[in-house]
Every structure is written in structure tokens, then in C-alpha cells.
Amino acid sequence: MQINTDLLQKIKVASVKNADSYLEKILCASVDHGNFGMDLLDRLRDQLPPTKCGNCGKCCNSISIYSLEYHRIVRDLMTGSDPSRLRRFFIAAMRMDLRQAEVGAEKRLRCLFRDDQTKVCLIHQVRPFACRIFGLLKEDMTRECDQVEDLVYPPRVVSEKMLEELQAKILENSEGYEVFPGTGVIHFFPFEFWVFRYLFSPERALQIYREILIPMSTPLTKFWQEKRKLEPIKDSDFEI
Ligand code: SF4
Ligand code: SF4
């Protein structure tokens, strides 16, 4: 999959030229969303064991989140940031060209909330589920990152079933879209997708997702290549 460089360039120029009006529209969408679902996210977060990690930042790439989590992050930024800081965040969200990275032989989009100079996550308190569950102790007693340590003793195993149940509650309250015809609706997209969804429209955000965000990330490219393989035809497909 090739990145649509013309589209990327248009977004780059427009994001600088229209920064203030874009920012206003993005913030208004999350104000309109209101507090809906914010308590739910806090309650679900509290069900996960607290952890700490080596903070190397290697995993801070190409993260997908739910719309509820997107509003949670934007609302938190609105209360904790001055206008110029907010403006920098949203220009950074749109300047995807500046955050392309390579991890080994794979392509990634660096998370705009990772500050590589100070080595912090700028939204640590409201970071999404995908970040919180990375490295938790699995049923087979392994972790995706061996630098993650539980802050409770004994360490708590977190089952796949539990994670699915927690995420299903977020999903039920989040928006979903079909990316390619016939592949079904999904609810998790990069932060940048949600910015464009509220700035322009779901259709335009889906175009940016297909033509920029997927090709920029090897995990997303692989995910969609796999998902777009046709299902084998079943007998029931012939029933009318
Ligand atoms: S979870 Fe692991 S890979 Fe990610 S920042 Fe922490 S130490 Fe690095
Ligand atoms: S939100 Fe924070 S923890 Fe998650 S990928 Fe970004 S910088 Fe890393």
C-alpha cells in the first residue's frame, strides 16, 4: 500500500493555514460530546492492575483507540492546556508526515503524545486502553514486554476474556465505521482518524485512514491485508 502523498501534502498546508478554525471545530465536537462515557472509562481503568515499565517508548506507535477514549483525551487536554499548547497538539496530529518512523523493517506512525526528549507520555492519566493493557501478565504467565512490572503483589493475571469484556463496554458506547466494503464495522482507529472525523466528516476521515494511516503503519497494513481476504463460501450463503 502506497501513501497518498498529494493528500498528505494538502493536509500539511491546510493544517498550518487554518490551524485556529480547525482547532475550534475539533474542540467544539468534544464539548458537544459532553461527559457521556467518561465515568465508564474511569471505572474500567480501575479494574486493571497498576503497572510500571522501563519507559523506553518503543511501543508508542500506531495506537488505535475508541471514539469515547478520543473525547476523553481531548477533554483532558482542554482542561489542562493553554491555547498555544492545544494548538501545537492538533497541528502535530495533522502533521503525520513529521512522525513517520521505522521499527526494524517495519513502518510506524509515532504517537504524538510521546515526548521523546523528556521521555514522558503527555496524556499518562487518560492514556487509552491499548496502552494500559500492553505488557499485563497473561494467562500463560508471559508479557508482551518483559520490562513491565505490576505495582501490586502478587502480580495479577489478566485473562483475554476479561479484556474482551472490558473493551466490549467501551465499544458499545463508541462510534464504528466500515473501512472497506464487506469487511464489517470496526470501532478502533488512530487518534488522527478521530481528529479528521470531527474536523471534516466520517467519509473524509476514512479516506485519510485508507490512503495515509494504513500505509504508514506496517501493523495496520498487515491487519487489513488479512481482513480483506475473502471468507470461504459457505452453504448458507446460497440460502435466500
Ligand atoms: S511497555 Fe515496554 S516497550 Fe513500551 S515503553 Fe514500556 S518498557 Fe518500553
Ligand atoms: S498515549 Fe502515551 S503510552 Fe500510549 S502510545 Fe502515546 S505516548 Fe505511549
Image (spheres, rainbow, N blue to C red):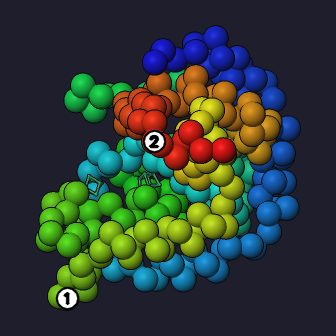
Q: Which mark is residue 234?
A: 2
- Would you identify the image quadrant in which residue 34 lies? bottom right
Mark in the foreground, 1 or 2: 2
Q: What residue type is labelled 1?
A: Tyr
User: Hey, what amino acid is under mark 2?
Assistant: Lys
Q: Quadrant of residue 229?
A: top left
Mark 2 sits near ligand 2, with its Cβ under 8 Å away: no
Which residue is outermost to the top? 6
Label 1 neighbourhood size at 10 Å, few (<14), some (14-19), many (20+)?
Answer: few
- Number of numbered labels in the structure image: 2
Label 2 SS: loop
Q: Which residue is drawn at 85% across and 38% down?
A: 21
Q: Position of residue 95 (x, y in %)?
A: 59, 29
Q: Which numbered disc covers residue 153?
A: 1
Left or right of 227, for residue 25: right
Viewer-proximal residue, 200 or 139? Answer: 139
On screen, residue 227 versus residue 177, left or right, reads: left
Q: Are marks 1 and 2 in contact (CB under 8 Å)?
A: no
The quarter of the picture where the C terminus appears is top right
Q: Is residue 193 visible?
A: no
Above or below, 220 against 212 in this view is below
Q: Residue 114 carries which label?
A: none
- Residue 50, given in percent of the width and then of the height, sits at 34, 78
Q: Position of residue 170 (x, y in %)?
A: 58, 68
- Name the residue: 75% across, 23% down: 14
Q: Earlier in the sequence, mark 1 or mark 2?
A: 1
Q: What element carries label 1?
A: loop
